[in-house]
Image (spheres, helix red, strand yellow):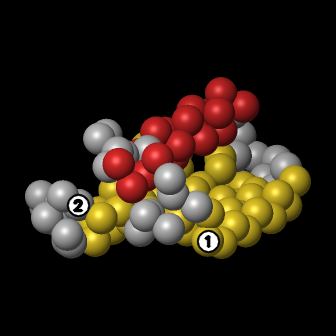
Amino acid sequence: MKSFIVLTLFVAAAVAIPLAPSSDSRNAEILSYESDNIGVDGYKFAFKTSDGKSVSEDAVLKNVGLENEAIEVRGQYSYPGDDGKIYTIYFLANEFGYQPSGDHLPK
């Protein structure tokens, strides 16, 4: 269970990092930041930066005390593309894996 939580957090962090940061990203400032560590039952955080990126996640522990106990993370991240459009990925990560969706992703 603990390894699943750690893996989920690494996946969430990895997808939030752009593959090719623009020069504006080097001087980006944090415009807002929220963090609510609920403890062992889940967490919530969000941030926005001056270069147009944003991330938010909300995690809850499901089936507490049962054999199939698992953390479920719902969230989204947005970033400006090289074409000037803002791209947003919505995701669900749980015992069934990472499940992204977005208007620009293939269905």
37 sits left or right of 26 in the view: right
Q: Which residue is mark 2?
A: 81
Query: Outermost residue toward the top?
Result: 3
Using the rendered image of the protein, determine whether residue 76 is visible from the camera's viewpoint.
no
> Residue 101's spot in the image, x, y percent?
29, 63
Give the vertical position of 10 relative to 55 (above or below).
Answer: above
88 sits left or right of 30 in the view: left
| Displayed quadrant of residue 89 | bottom left
Q: Residue at x 51, y 57 (%)?
A: 28
Secondary structure type for disc 2: loop
Q: Residue at x 14, y 64 (%)?
A: 83
Q: Which mark is residue 71?
A: none
Q: Is 26 or 73 nearer to us in this picture?
A: 26
Q: Which mark is residue 31?
A: 1
Viewport quadrant of the C terminus: bottom left
Q: Answer few, some or many: residues within 10 Å of disc 1's Cα (few below 14, many 20 plus, some between 14 and 19).
A: few
> Residue 72's spot in the image, x, y percent?
59, 55
Amino acid, disc 1: Leu
Secondary structure type for disc 1: strand
Q: Is 17 or 96 nearer to us in this picture?
A: 17
Q: Residue at x 65, y 72 (%)?
A: 32
Q: Is 85 or 3 nearer to us in this picture?
A: 85
Amino acid, disc 2: Gly
